[in-house]
Image (cartoon, grey):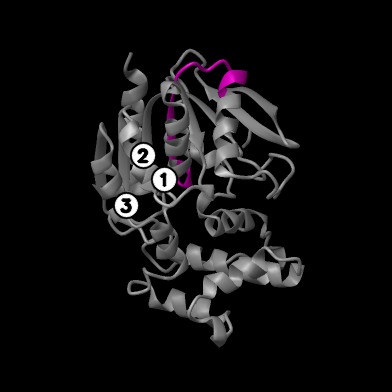
């Protein structure tokens, strides 16, 4: 992220196991803090994420998760698990002296928020989440095994075109093994194939342009693959089976046509949470347009509450 006139501070926080996190504290320091959790896993915070907030009335803590963005060591898979990221949020809160705060994020960020809330419920005033993902095997299979291909058959066929016919019954198993292997050429090829698969279905249209292969950096998607291969380092349906323990108010914003995170999981989670509010929007997985505006309104209302 780029510092601007609303930046309170940029800092690096050592969190153990040789990991150091980039943290960007931004907005109105007197406001109720919001901790923003980026997606991925393996992505990073970007300047465009600031557009979700009003820096004159809100304080937002952005940070790049382990191995991501400006955090070090870049691309590291060592000691990079959901449990470690949960503890990282707690360490950031302690470092910045945040007693209670709002959590927001989308996709993987929603999963991490829910996991943190289960471990540290007293810290969380409320959550506002979009593109709901809970880390269950069914959700991982939805994306990785092309359960959405009835809507985007061409995207699935392109994925198969980069997969030997002997692995067409489970192409992601083939690509995951290569992406995390020691052959750097094969790893980049498979990381690129899987990244393009996800990119092809993230929006509701077909205006997807792959990155230039020569300039392509596979570090981020390799972190995502490691998490998906290990079911986000949680027992199957862990968040869903424990959702009744999350008693804080939780707002869910879900695209009806999300091809990355199946909408049925947002619906199931909504019915398991004691105090949740589910808003459906006409959209896919991309955080834009109607869903973005609704989430922004929810966050403004939450920060106005005393």
Name the N-terminal-most of marks 1 and 3.
Answer: 1
On the picture, is 13 further left or further right than 34? right
The residue positioned 34% from the left and 32% from the top of the image is: 245
Quadrant assignment for the N terminus:
top right
- Is the C-beta separation of discs 2 and 1 under 8 Å? yes
Say if residue 212 shows up in the picture.
Answer: no
Q: Where residue 177 is drawn, which disc sits there?
A: none
On the picture, is 273 further left or further right than 87? left
The residue positioned 55% from the left and 49% from the top of the image is: 41
Select label 1 or label 3 by which is in front.
Answer: 1
The residue positioned 61% from the left and 40% from the top of the image is: 65
- The residue singled out by tag 3 in the image is 265
Residue 258 position, x and y percent, is 35, 58
Residue 82 position, x and y percent, is 55, 42
Q: Quadrant of residue 113?
A: top left
Residue 77 position, x and y percent, is 68, 50
The residue positioned 60% from the left and 56% from the top of the image is: 226
- The residue singled out by tag 2 in the image is 242
Q: Looking at the image, how many numbered discs can be counted on the residues?
A: 3
Name the secondary structure under disc 2: helix
Name the secondary structure under disc 3: helix
Name the N-terminal-most of marks 3 and 2.
Answer: 2
On the picture, is 16 further left or further right than 1? right
Q: Residues within 10 Å of mark 2 (few under 14, many from 20)?
A: some
Q: Foreground: 85 or 107?
A: 85
Q: Is residue 182 above or below residue 136?
A: below
Q: For the magenta stretch, what is the residue range?
A: 93-109
- The residue singled out by tag 1 in the image is 238
Quadrant assignment for the C terminus:
top left
Residue 204 position, x and y percent, is 36, 62
């Amino acid at each position: 992220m780029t510092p601007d006139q609303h930046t309170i501070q940029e800092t690096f926080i050592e969190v153990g196991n040789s990991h150091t996190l980039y943290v960007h504290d931004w907005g109105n320091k007197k406001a109720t803090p919001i901790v923003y959790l980026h997606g991925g896993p393996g992505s990073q915070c970007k300047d465009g994420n600031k557009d979700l907030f009003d820096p004159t009335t809100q304080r937002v803590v952005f940070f790049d998760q382990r191995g991501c963005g400006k955090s070090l060591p870049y691309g590291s898979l060592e000691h990079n698990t959901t449990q470690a990221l949960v503890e990282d949020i707690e360490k950031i809160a302690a470092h910045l002296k945040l007693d209670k705060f709002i959590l927001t994020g989308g996709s993987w960020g929603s999963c991490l928020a829910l996991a943190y809330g289960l471990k540290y419920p007293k810290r969380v005033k409320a959550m506002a989440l979009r593109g709901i993902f809970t880390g269950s095997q069914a959700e991982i299979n939805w994306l990785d095994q092309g359960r959405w291909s009835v809507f985007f058959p061409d995207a699935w066929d392109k994925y198969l075109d980069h997969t030997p016919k002997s692995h067409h019954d489970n192409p992601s198993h083939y690509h995951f093994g290569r992406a995390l292997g020691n052959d750097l050429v094969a790893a980049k090829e498979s990381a690129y194939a899987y990244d393009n698969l996800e990119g092809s279905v993230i929006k509701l249209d077909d205006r997807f342009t792959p990155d230039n292969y020569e300039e392509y950096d596979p570090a981020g998607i390799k972190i995502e693959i490691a998490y998906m291969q290990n079911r986000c380092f949680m027992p199957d349906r862990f968040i869903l089976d424990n959702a009744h323990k999350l008693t804080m108010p939780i707002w869910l914003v879900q695209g009806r046509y999300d091809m990355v995170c199946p909408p049925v999981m947002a619906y199931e989670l909504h019915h398991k949470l004691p105090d949740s509010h589910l808003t459906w929007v006409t959209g896919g997985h991309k955080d834009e347009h109607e869903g973005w505006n609704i989430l922004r309104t929810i966050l403004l209302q939450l920060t106005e509450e005393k």
